[in-house]
Amino acid sequence: MADDETKEGDKDTTTDAAKNDRRDIDSVVSEIVSKYGSERAALRVLADQQLDYRREIRDAKGKLPKAGEVVLSADDAKTWEAFRALGKTPKQIGESIAAVDALTTENTSLKVEKVIAEAAGLVNYKPSVLTELAKLKGFRVEVREDGKGDEKKKVAYAVKGEGDEAEESELTAFAADSLADFLPALAAEPTGNGKTITASSSAPLPPQPPRGTAPAPKVKDVAALVAEKRATGAYSQI
């Protein structure tokens, strides 16, 4: 009920304000005529003001954007002018950006490949397997120099995460803990001369006789056999 009364009061107040804003027209006309001395003088003043209002409205309409047009702020206008100074169409600029992005991606891939190859060489891992495991397990490989002076050496690390939340450990320790099932495939094969190879290889074997075939016995000369028998006394001449 109180809300209804408030609404009623607000309505009445608004109506009264509207009535006060628009006074009796005759009273207004009388004031204008009295101010300018005559009805004609007052009419000239009002006509002149009306012409001014019409010009202002016409000028304002002329400044409004037409259908499909956009009004730019001062900062946006500067950006637009800089864009026009490039002398390129939006399509050409889009193609240039796409080409730069592709080159950036390729360059990043090459850098990652180079780092992984270096790290794999330090710990005797296969680069190809290490690359796939890095993608599969979500870690990246880094190579850093640890130590000082003559004791400085390069060490391979496995890093997960970014910034302050990044977790890192030496690559061999990380592999032993998180890649244990993949170690046989990850480890490079020794060559026997202190180096490693990443693919198995072996020297060609000499030709072998078929399985189940014994070497053929050497056949002795008949005269030699007779001589051997006579020497042992197991052979008698008839």
Image (spheres, rainbow, N blue to C red):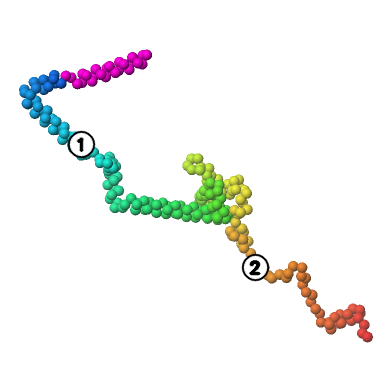
The answer to whether residue 201 is left or right of residue 102 is: right
In the displayed image of the protein, which residue is found farthest to the bottom? 238
Secondary structure under the numbered disc 2 in the rendered image = loop
Task: Give the x, y percent position of residue 209.
Answer: 73, 70
Task: Give the x, y percent position of residue 79.
Answer: 29, 45
Q: Nearer the viewer, residue 71 or 153?
A: 71
Which of the two marks, 1 or 2, is nearer to us in this view?
A: 1
Residue at image position (50%, 54%) is 113
Task: Name the quadrant of the N terminus.
Answer: top left
Task: Name the quadrant of the C terminus.
Answer: bottom right
Q: Amino acid at mark 2?
A: Pro
Disc 2 designates what residue?
204
Task: Give the x, y percent position of residue 82.
Answer: 29, 47
**Dot 1, how many residues are within 10 Å of its Cα: few (below 14), some (14-19), or many (20+)?**
few
**Dot 2, how many residues are within 10 Å of its Cα: few (below 14), some (14-19), or many (20+)?**
few
Would residue 181 be visible to someone looking at this image? yes
Q: Which range of residues does the magenta coloring cover?
A: 1-24
The answer to whether residue 100 is left or right of residue 46 is: right
Secondary structure under the numbered disc 1 in the rendered image = helix
Q: Amino acid at mark 1?
A: Ala
Disc 1 designates what residue?
60
Q: Is residue 214 magenta?
A: no
Would residue 173 be visible to someone looking at this image? no
Quarter location, residue 218: bottom right
Q: Is residue 89 above or below residue 38?
A: below
Q: CA distance from mark 1 to mark 2?
A: 95 Å
- Residue contact between numbered discs 1 and 2, judged by CB atoms under 8 Å: no
Residue at image position (37%, 53%) is 95
Which sits earlier in the primary sequence, circle 1 or circle 2?
1
The answer to whether residue 93 is left or right of residue 129 is: left
